[in-house]
Amino acid sequence: MSKSALVRLKEFLANRPEGGAIVGVVALFVFFSLGTEHFLAVKSFRSMLTLAAYWGIAAGGVTLLMISGEFDLSVGSMLGLSAMGVAIMVNAGLPSPIAVVMMLIVCVAIGLLQGLAVVKLGIPSFIITLGGMLLFRAITYLIHLVVVQGDYVRVPQDDAFYQILSYRFESGFNITPLWFLGITVILYLILHRTHFGNWIFATGGNKLAAIQSGVPVNRVKVILFGLTAGLACLAGIFEMTRFPSVGPQGGKLLELYLIAMVVMGGTRLIGGYGSVVGTVFGLAMMAMMKNGLSLMGVSAYWYNAVVGIIILIAVIVNVNSQRRALGVRHE
């Protein structure tokens, strides 16, 4: 590759939200390909793809919400509540499509209420959704204790609707990555091809200027809270179909991993800048780290430590890029 081509590539990566994540994916791919024996095996790739798909369904909503300048720490608890709630309703005799729709309505309503609390009460979303995270997790454990007496809830694997959601091809690949791809394409089009997407960037970039330009800032934020909760619910339902039974631990700490993926994908912590594509690369980084470290025999505790270090590095890079961008604006 010529020097001019390298310069153009460097400029392209520097000017794209997902530039750093692309470099990270390539570096991790090379590292684990050389450092582990089975990293390039089909089984390994299938595991990474499936894991990234379940995370990614919830991460898409978190991305749009963070671009608007808000956070949702309740998505992991929402995921766990959704998985257990749907399984309990189906075991009680409710048709699975109705149970899924009912849980979606409940979760979207909860997300909208959290959004209304943020915009009407003026309380930071970090605090509102932190309370939601603790509350919904407590409700999940309470349901687990009272309704099923602390036992795991059976997932009806023979249910036709569940089989559609968890269909497995002859190659062994699960259908969930296709659902994830469809949702990601829709979110990409919303963000980059619609007026609502422009409103999201404007809301996170400069709230006062957005209001003066006629952007319904509060409405945008409330809708995004509802969307994020709905996608977290979907992620919980898809993940539930993978296992013969579910417990109250589903989605634990997922909210922190999702924020890490979104930040690694180039979305700024202060909002106004980000990319759904970048989040996909952030997902790929996390999936490769989890699978690669597992293949290397590294303990799960060290995986969390590595994720923590990656988060710190990503935040430092993120903040420095924000400062450079602000410096450019001030010149």
Image (cartoon, rainbow, N blue to C red):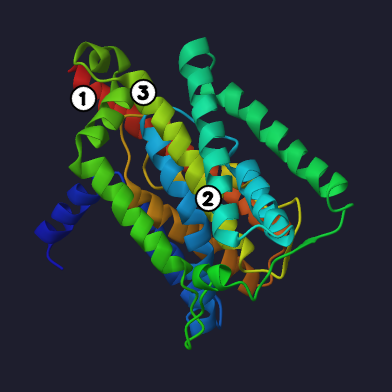
Camera-nearest residue between 106 and 314: 106
Q: What residue does disc 1 label? A: 328
Name the secondary structure under disc 2: helix
**As drawn, which residue projects farthest toward the bottom?**
170
Amino acid at circle 2: Val
Check residue 305 in the rendering and tell me which mark sits there, or answer none: none
- Taking the spot 51% from the left edge, 67% from the top edge, the residue there is 165
From where the camera sits, is residue 15 visible? no
Dot placed on the residue nearer the N-terminal end, 2 or 1? 2
Q: Is residue 167 visible?
A: yes
Q: Vertically, is 223 above or below 210?
A: below
- Answer left or right for 240 relative to 247: left
Q: Residue 138 location, x and y as percent?
A: 77, 37
10 Å crowding of disc 2: few (<14), some (14-19), many (20+): few
Q: Residue furthest right?
A: 149
| Residue neighbourhood size for the residue with mark 1, other residues' Cα within 10 Å, grouped as few (<14), some (14–19), many (≥20) | few
Identify the residue position indicated by label 3 in the image: 219
Q: Secondary structure at mark 3?
A: helix
Residue 170 location in percent, x, y?
A: 48, 88
Query: Which residue is depicted at the point 81% across and 60% down?
Result: 152
